[in-house]
Structures are given as C-alpha cells and as structure tokens.
Image (spheres, rainbow, N blue to C red):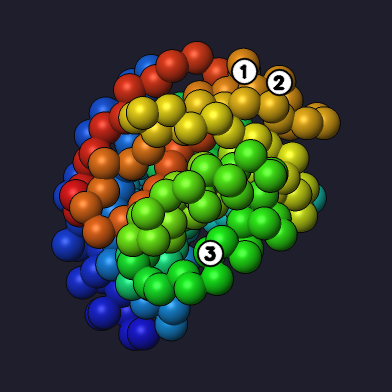
C-alpha cells in the first residue's frame, strides 16, 4: 500500500477524544491482512499526536506490542478477525486485553471445548440448543483469550488456566490458576458489537467503556 493510500486511511479516522484515567476507549476498524498493523498505528497516532510512521512499537518477552519511552502512558491491545479489527486503549493500564470473533461456522465447537476448556464449561456449551452452541463457544473463547492477551502470555499460558462461570448476562471470572490469578483482581466486559463476539479484560478497578469509532 503506497503513501497516498495510507494517508487516506488515516484521514478517515476522527480526532481522538480525551482519554480519561477511568476510561477504556474502543475503536472498530476495517481490516485487511495485507495492511498489517496500519490501522493500529493510525489509531495510536491520533492519541499521541504523531504521524503514523513515527509510532514505534516495542515487543515484550512473549511478543506483545507496547509503546515505549515517553509514550508508555498509553496502553493498548488489539484483535482482528475476518475483516474486522478492534483496538482498546487506556491510560496506565498495562494489563489490558481484547479479543473478537467474526461470524464464521464453528462445526467443531463442542469438540474444541472438550479439548481446551474446563469440563464444566464444555458442559455449558453442550446444554445449549444446537443453534446457540457456537455462540457460547465464541463467548468463552474471547473471554479467555482477552485475559490471556492482557496477561501477556497469550494462548501459550493455557485456555484451561482461566475459568469462567456463566451468568444470565455474560461470564463471571471464576478460578484463574497460576501467576495470572486471582480472578478477583480482574474485570471482564462483553463488547456491544453487532456482528461480532468479543470481550475486553483488564486487571484493576472498574473502568467505563467508550465506543469511540466504527460501532
């Protein structure tokens, strides 16, 4: 993608609003694999007051991208699925994760749940009517991966190491094992995202979600 196309994409995005210390901002973007992190850089540039080419990312030990130096105040995480991407941003919230799943068939949802989830979670999926099993699988998957991404290890830590208890409205953090716990330290919020299933997770006090763009 040439410079003119990159600049056009950047100019389509609005100016970033003020990011309060008790807020998490959420941006929903179009995503194409060939663009790589272009959309992420465009959003970060809006908050940092920089050109996109000046946004420099560092990598933590397990590959998680972060901002360094004088820009370390801005924490973020992002996820993409299909032709959708979501960026979550906050001030001074280094343990922040987001994960989304775009609509797609999951014919092996029950099998995957038995293999990677806890038995009681797989049972919850199996109890659903057939048309809802894939949705329950995606709810659990995105909740787990949001926590694992926030922690920094990602899927390598183990999907079964973070357990959730289903409630009428969503999922409640249950038993988190190892260094990632205790679950009482964590917050989880389902994304209000038509056409997507997703969660935001962070360690710390309650924060307000703000749907800034693309929703």
75 w.r.t. 99: above or below:
above
- The CA span between labels 2 and 1 is 6 Å
Q: Which residue is mark 1?
A: 185
Q: Classify mark 2: residues with Cα within 10 Å, few (<14), some (14-19) or many (20+).
A: some
Q: Residue at x 19, y 62 (%)?
A: 11
Q: Secondary structure at mark 1?
A: helix
Q: Quadrant of the N terminus?
A: bottom left
Coordinates of residue 65 in the picture (x, y in percent)? 61, 52
Image quarter of residue 53: bottom left
170 w.r.t. 138: above or below:
above
Residue 149, can we see it?
Answer: no
Number of numbered tags placed on the structure image: 3
Of labels 1 and 3, the one closer to you: 3
Q: Secondary structure at mark 2?
A: loop
Does residue 151 appear to the left or right of 41 in the view shown? right
Q: Which residue is mark 2?
A: 182
Q: Residue at x 48, y 73 (%)?
A: 107
Among all residues in the image, which is located at the extreme right?
Answer: 178
Q: Residue at x 62, y 16 (%)?
A: 184
Image quarter of residue 34: bottom left
Q: Which residue is mark 3?
A: 109
Coordinates of residue 171 in the picture (x, y in percent)? 47, 32
- The CA span between labels 1 and 3 is 29 Å
Q: Residue at x 68, y 44 (%)?
A: 119
First in sequence: mark 2 or mark 3? 3
Q: Classify mark 3: residues with Cα within 10 Å, few (<14), some (14-19) or many (20+).
A: some
* Marks 2 and 3 in Cβ contact (< 8 Å): no
First in sequence: mark 1 or mark 3? 3
């Amino acid at each position: 993608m040439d410079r003119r196309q990159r600049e056009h994409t950047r100019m389509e995005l609005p100016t970033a609003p003020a990011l309060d210390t008790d807020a998490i901002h959420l941006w929903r973007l179009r995503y194409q694999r060939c663009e790589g992190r272009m959309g992420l850089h465009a959003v970060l540039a809006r908050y940092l007051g920089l050109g996109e080419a000046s946004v420099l990312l560092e990598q933590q030990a397990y590959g998680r991208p972060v901002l360094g130096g004088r820009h370390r105040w801005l924490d973020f995480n992002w996820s993409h699925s299909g032709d959708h991407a979501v960026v979550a941003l906050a001030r001074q919230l280094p343990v922040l994760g987001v994960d989304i799943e775009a609509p797609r068939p999951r014919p092996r949802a029950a099998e995957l749940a038995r293999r990677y989830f806890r038995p009681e979670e797989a049972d919850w999926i199996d109890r659903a009517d057939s048309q809802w099993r894939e949705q329950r699988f995606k709810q659990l998957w995105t909740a787990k991966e949001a926590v694992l991404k926030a922690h920094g290890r990602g899927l390598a830590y183990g999907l079964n190491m973070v357990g959730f208890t289903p409630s009428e409205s969503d999922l409640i953090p249950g038993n988190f094992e190892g260094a990632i716990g205790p679950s009482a330290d964590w917050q989880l919020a389902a994304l209000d995202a038509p056409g997507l299933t997703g969660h935001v997770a962070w360690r710390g006090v309650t924060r307000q979600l703000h749907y800034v763009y693309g929703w």
